[in-house]
Amino acid sequence: MGFLAGRTALVSGGGRGQGRSHAQALAAEGADVVVCDIAEDIATVPYHLSSQADLDETVARIEALDRRAIGLVADMRSTEQVNQVVTTAISEFGRIDILVANQGIISHAPVDGTTDEVWDNIIATNLTGIFKLTRAVLPHMRERGYGRIVATASSIARSGRANVAAYAASKWGVLGFVKSCAQDVAGTGITVNALCPSIVDTGMILNPATFKLFCPEIGHPTQADFEGRVKDMFGPGHFPAEDVSRTLLYIVGDERGVINGQGHDLAYGGMTRMPI
C-alpha cells in the first residue's frame, strides 16, 4: 500500500487531463478519491470540455487500482454545487485530507476583444471556484488538524502572454490566493500550495483554437504545426500531465507540513518566463 493509504482526496476538474492524472496518481498511492467535473461545454470556451463519459472513465481507472471512487457532476462557479460536492465527499468517505483544486478553462482574445462573459467565466472557474472549494473544505480540515490543498495555477501567471489576459489574471490570482491562504492556516496542520506548469498535453491545449493561437499565419494548423512552433519558441516544449502529478505527490507527501504557500514551477529546460 502507498504512502497515502487511509487518506481521501477531492479532485476537481477530474474528468480528464491533469485532473484525471492527479486522481490516478493519488489512488496509486493508496488514497480514495472523489472526482468532480462540470461535464458539459461552456459557450465561451473554444473547445469541448469533459463529458459524463470522461468522468466515468476516471472513476473506473481509480477503481481499477482497487481504491474507492465516486464521480460528481458539479460546476465550480456555483457555491451551492461546490458545497454539495464537499458535503457528499465527507458523507461518503468520512474525511477530506487532500484537496486538488484543478478545474480550469481558457479562451483566446486580446484585451479589447475580450467580452464580459469570457472574462467572467474564466475568473469564476479558474480563480473564484478555487476560493469556493477551499473555503468549503477548510472548516473540516481545521477540525481535524490536517489538510493538503493544492491549486492549479500556470507558468503564464508569472509571464503573461498575448491574447490570454483573462486566463493569466486568473492564474496570477491563484498564486496570490494560495500565498495568503497559507498564512491564514499556518500552524493548523494544513498547507496550501500551487502547481505552475507550462504547456501540458491536455485537451485544454491540444485543440484547434490553441493551434491557431500559436500558428496564426497557417490557415488550418495541425497538432504537428503547433508542436513544431512550440519547439521553436520554447525548446523541448510540452510534457505529459503525469509529470505534473509527480510534483503533486511530492507536495501532499509532506507529512511535516514544511512546504507551504509556494508556487511550484514545472517546465522542461528551455521554457522561458519572466521572473516575479
Image (tube, rainbow, N blue to C red):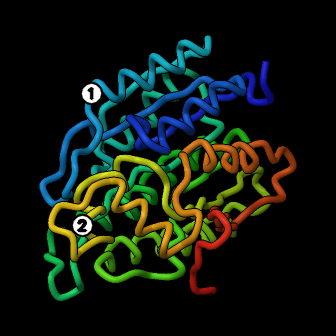
- Viewer-nearest residue: 159 or 150: 159
Q: Quadrant of the N terminus?
A: top right
In the image, residue 123 lies at what x, y percent?
32, 67
In the image, taking residue 223 as reference, residue 256 lies left or right, namely right
Residue 207 — which label? none
Residue 240 vertical position relative to residue 7 in the rendered view, above or below:
below
Residue 105 placement: quadrant = bottom left
Residue 213 placement: quadrant = bottom left
Indicate the amino acid at tag 1: Gln
Count of all numbered marks drawn on residues in the image: 2
Q: Which residue is mark 2?
A: 212
Q: Residue at x 29, y 62 (%)?
A: 211
In the image, residue 19 lies at what x, y percent?
48, 41
In the image, taking residue 146 as reference, residue 112 lies left or right, namely left
Q: Residue at x 72, y 22 (%)?
A: 6
In the image, residue 58 lies at what x, y percent?
44, 26
For disc 1, the neighbor class at 10 Å (few under 14, some 14 to 19, many from 20) is some
Q: Which residue is mark 1?
A: 52
